[in-house]
C-alpha cells in the first residue's frame, strides 16, 4: 500500500507562480451537484422543446417526425437521468 503523501500532487512549488494550499478552494460535492444540475436542466430543456414541437401546429414542422423524436426522447431520457443521479450521488463506504 502506497503512502498517501506520495500520491498527492503538489502544485505549490512552481517557482513562486503556484498557489498556496490555502488559496485553492475545491469542494467535490458541490462540483458534482453543479454538474448533475447542468446535465438535468439540459435534458429538461430538450424534453420540453421536443414536446412543444410535437404539439405545435406549424407548416414547417412535420408532425410525424416530431412524434418520432418525442417518443425517442421519452424512452431515452429516464435511463440517462437515472445514470446521472446514480453516478453522482452514490456514497462510497471507505
Image (cartoon, rainbow, N blue to C red):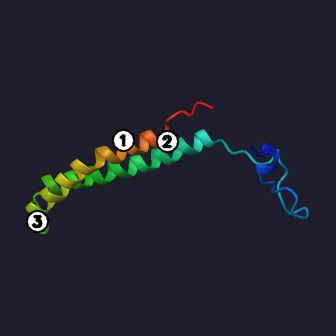
Q: Which mark is residue 82?
A: 1
Q: Secondary structure at mark 1?
A: helix
Q: Are marks 1 and 2 in contact (CB under 8 Å)?
A: no
Question: Where does the image place residue 68, in percent across and percent down from the top left?
Answer: 14, 58
- In which image quadrant can residue 70 be found? bottom left
User: Callout 1: few (<14), some (14-19), or many (20+) C-alpha neighbours within 10 Å?
Assistant: few
Residue in the foreground of this view, choosing between 84 and 41 = 84
Residue 72 vertical position relative to residue 62 in the rendered view, above or below: above
Q: Is residue 80 left or right of residue 35?
A: left
How far apart marks 1 and 2 lie (CA) works out to: 10 Å
Residue in the foreground of this view, choosing between 71 and 63 = 71
Q: Which residue is disc 3 drawn over?
A: 62
* Furthest residue toward bottom: 60
How far apart marks 3 and 1 lie (CA) works out to: 31 Å
* Furthest residue toward right: 15
- Quadrant that contains the C terminus: top right
Mark whose residue sits in front, 3 or 1: 1
- In which image quadrant can residue 81 be found? top left
Mark whose residue sits in front, 2 or 3: 2
- Quadrant that contains the N terminus: top right
Q: Which mark is residue 88?
A: 2
Question: Where does the image place residue 43, in percent across and percent down from the top left?
Answer: 35, 50
Q: Secondary structure at mark 3?
A: loop
How far apart marks 2 and 3 lie (CA) works out to: 38 Å
User: Callout 3: few (<14), some (14-19), or many (20+) C-alpha neighbours within 10 Å?
Assistant: few
Q: Is residue 56 visible?
A: no
Amino acid at each position: 500500500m502506497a503512502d498517501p503523501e506520495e500520491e498527492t500532487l503538489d502544485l505549490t512549488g512552481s517557482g513562486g507562480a503556484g498557489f498556496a494550499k490555502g488559496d485553492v478552494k475545491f469542494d467535490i460535492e458541490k462540483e458534482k451537484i453543479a454538474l448533475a444540475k447542468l446535465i438535468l436542466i439540459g435534458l429538461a430543456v430538450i424534453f420540453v422543446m421536443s414536446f412543444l414541437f410535437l404539439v405545435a401546429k406549424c407548416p414547417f414542422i412535420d408532425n410525424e417526425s416530431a412524434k418520432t423524436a418525442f417518443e425517442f426522447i421519452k424512452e431515452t431520457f429516464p435511463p440517462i437521468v437515472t445514470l446521472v443521479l446514480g453516478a453522482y450521488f452514490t456514497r462510497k463506504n471507505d
